Amino acid sequence: MSAETSVISNVEKREANVFAMVEPMEHEQVMYFNDKETGLKGIIGIHNTVLGPSLGGCRIWNYENESDALWDVLRLSRGMTFKSSISGINLGGGKAVIIGNPKVKRDEAFWRRFGKFVDSLNGNYITAEDVGTSTDVMSIVMQETKHVTGKPISAGGTGDPSPFTAYGVFLGVKASVKQLTGSDSMEGKKVAVQGVGHVGFYLIGHLIKAGAIVYVCDINQANLDKATKEYPSITVVAPEEIYGLDVDVYAPCALGATVNGSTINQLKCSIIAGAANNQLADENVHGHALLDKGIIYAPDFLINAGGVINCYREIHNLSKQQTMDLIENIYSRTLQIFEKSAKENIPTQEAAIRIAVERIENEKKKQ
Ligand code: NAD
C-alpha cells in the first residue's frame, strides 16, 4: 500500500456525494472497493436485507465516470430487492459493479481479490454472474468466499441460469396472452424475440413447441446462425425492424430501456413480455404510456426471476422440482398483477412494485 496521499478536486468531491443518491433509494449499505495491485475497483450496493441476505450479479462495465457506476449499482440492487420479494423467495437486493472494459480478460488474482471483498461483508451480499462475468469466474471467486452462487455444475453449482429464466419468461408470455384473449394457448401467436443470446435461444424453444410463430433479430451473426439452425421455422428480421412488426408479443431479450418514447410509437404488439432487465426507459413515464396505448406489459423483474430463483436453489439446496414449482408461480403472479393494475388503474410495473414492497413491510413488522 502506498504511503502517499492524493488531493481530490472540489468537482470530484461534489460528484462523490453518495448520500444524495443513496437516501432517496433507501439503500442500507454501499461499499467501494479498490485494489491497486490487480486494478480491481468497483462498488457493491446492498439495498435491502429484510427478507434475507442481499443477492445480485457482479457486472463489469466501462462506466464513463464514478457517478454512472454508483447510479447503476443502486438502481440494479434496488431492482433485485423487488425481484426476490415478488418471487416469494427470502433474499434481499444487492449488486456489484466493477469499473473496467468487460472484454478484457482478468487473471485469477483479480477475481480472488473480488472474492475477498465479497467475503468481508460476511454474507450480507451474495454474488453471482452478470454482464461480463461467468460461471467460470464464479468458480475462482468461490476460492475466497462461500457467498457466491451461479457456480458451474462441476464446482457443485447449478450452472447456466438462462434455461430457468427463459421458462419463467415463457410463463409470463402465456399469462399475458391469457389476459388478452382469455386463453393462454400460444398456437398461431406471433412473437418477436429481440436478442437470441442465452435466454432468447431457450425462449424460442418454448414458443415453437407451443405452436407460436417466431420472428427474431440480433446483432451477433453467430447467435443468429445457432438459433436458425436449431429452429429453421423462425424468421430473421433486421434489428431496427423488430419494433414495428405486426405481432402479438414483443419479447425484449437483449438490452434494457428498449421501451421508450420512440419505440412505443412504433409498436404494433398487444403485449410486451421479455427477459431484459429495466425494459422501461423511465418507469414513471413509460408504464403510463403503455397503459394509455392499451399494451399489456408483464413486468420484467417478475417474469425474468427464474435466474435468481435458481440461485436461491443453490443456497438452500432445493431440488430441481422445488425450483420449478417456484418458477411456475410466475404465471399466477403475473395475472395477479394485471388484476391489481386494472383495479387500481396503475401501470403493471407500479402494481408489481407495490406488492413487492408490501411483502417487505409485512416482514419488517415481525422483526
Ligand atoms: P446474452 O448476452 O447472452 O444475449 C443477449 C443477446 O442480445 C446477444 O445475442 C446480443 O448479440 C443481442 N443483442 C445485443 N444488442 C442487440 C440489439 N441492439 N438488437 C438485437 N440484439 C441485440 O444475454 P442473456 O443472458 O440472454 O440475457 C438477455 C437479457 O436478459 C439481458 O438484458 C439480461 O440482463 C437479462 N436477464 C438474463 C438472465 C439470465 O439468466 N441470463 C436473468 C435475468 C435477466
Image (tube, grey):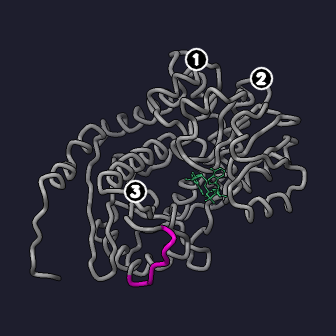
The Cα–Cα distance between marks 1 and 2, rounded to whole angstroms, is 21 Å
- Residue 58 at least partly seen: no
Residue 108 lies in the magenta-colored region: yes
Secondary structure under tag 2 reads loop
The label on residue 182 is: 2
Q: Earlier in the sequence, mark 3 or mark 2?
A: 3
Residue 296 lies in the magenta-colored region: no
The residue shown at (33%, 64%) is: 42
Secondary structure that dominates the magenta span:
loop
The magenta stretch is 102-109
Three-letter amino acid code at disc 1? Asp
Three-letter amino acid code at disc 3? Lys
Report how many numbered discs are placed on residues in the image: 3
Indicate the quadrant where residue 32 lies. Answer: bottom left
Q: Disc 1 or disc 2, which is closer to the eye?
A: 1
Is 281 located above or below residue 50 in the figure?
above
The label on residue 95 is: 3
Give coordinates of residue 218: x percent, y percent.
70, 53
